[in-house]
Image: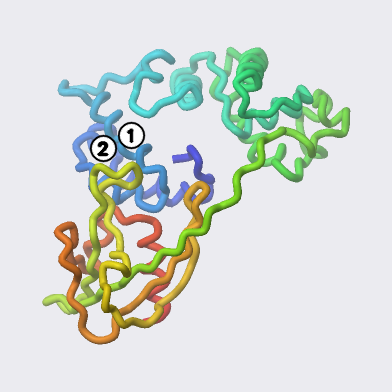
Amino acid sequence: MLQQTRVEAVIPYYQRFLELFPSIDRLARADEVEVLAAWSGLGYYSRARNLHRTAKQIAGKGRRPVYPATWEEVFSLPGVGPYTAAAISSIALGLPHAALDGNVIRVISRLTNDASEVSSPAARRSFTEEAARLLDRRRPGDFNQAMMELGATICLPRNPDCGRCPVETFCAARSAGTERELPVKLKKPSARDIPLDLVLLRRQTEASRTGIFLIQRSFAERRMAGFWELPPKQAFPRLRGTKLGEFSHRIVNDRFLLTIWAPIGTVDPPDLSSGSWFDSAELSRIPLTTITKKALAAARKYR
């Protein structure tokens, strides 16, 4: 969950996820829809699918789960890269592998006063070798977590708190006065603005609940395959409606400029085979796109 996501955003998801899936076996037996619904809002949903596949692989068909015991076995699990494999094998298994994430790269860049562009292959190799050299092989898990925490709380991107840093004495960038110039990163491309108009169709169900019409993304989609979302306004060529709210949502380099519309009068849903009605109680049990969650929250303010 912490890959590409801030700790404060992860904590409530983590706690709820463990309540729903307290064991490898429980996660392995869950439906993918159930797993995606619990992950909904965190983004990068391939992580949830890979975690589900990993649970099934570890649980296997025997009586007891077969857990990985080496870095290579951890690395072979679905969706696990070098950093995750190093973090898991050092923290959970006590194996001497240095974990290199963005926080650790920043710390090492400053410790060594290395002005290499951090995404270059040569720089990655250099930082990886330095992390391995620094690693406390007797307590690799504690060391990796300490390095991550140092980067997350003290060796900050824009305003490093050097006065509180336990390794200030050894920091080459601090000595050279270049700590605020490092690490060197390529400038991110500017966001592309994409207007998106969505329609919120409501109806009263037999149980006197509010039903909402959603459509399901194709399972062949590259992003958020199988997730449910509000239908686009272009599906209603003659729609007369009022604005319920506006907001923006950024995904990588795309900034979506959302407008939510409510139809005036009675409007039947478009003839979409992928569409279905859901009442409010069902929404928590299906995977919703983050944009749809935000749209529903924005619409509630205008009731």
Q: Is residue 204 visible?
A: yes
| Location of residue 149 (image quadrant) | top right
| Residue 45 horizontal side relative to residue 119, left or right | left
- 84, above or below 156, in the image: above
Q: Residue at x 44, y 66 (%)?
A: 258
Q: Name the residue beneath numbered marker 1.
A: 51
Disc 2: CA contacts within 10 A as few (<14), some (14-19) or many (>=20): many
Disc 1: CA contacts within 10 A as few (<14), some (14-19) or many (>=20): many
| Location of residue 169 (image quadrant) | top right
Question: How far across and down, in percent of the image, does residue 13 sit?
Answer: 40, 49
- 177, above or below 266, in the image: above
Q: Residue at x 25, y 42 (%)?
A: 220
| Residue 149 horizontal side relative to residue 56, left or right | right
Amino acid at dot 1: Leu
| Disc 2 element | helix
Residue nearest the viewer, comparing 94 with 7: 7
Q: Which mark is residue 27?
A: 2
Question: How far across and down, in percent of the image, does residue 38 sit?
Answer: 32, 49
Q: Residue furthest bottom?
A: 265
- 210, above or below 252, in the image: below
Question: How far across and down, in percent of the image, does residue 181 sit?
Answer: 79, 37
| Residue 21 horizontal side relative to residue 251, left or right | left
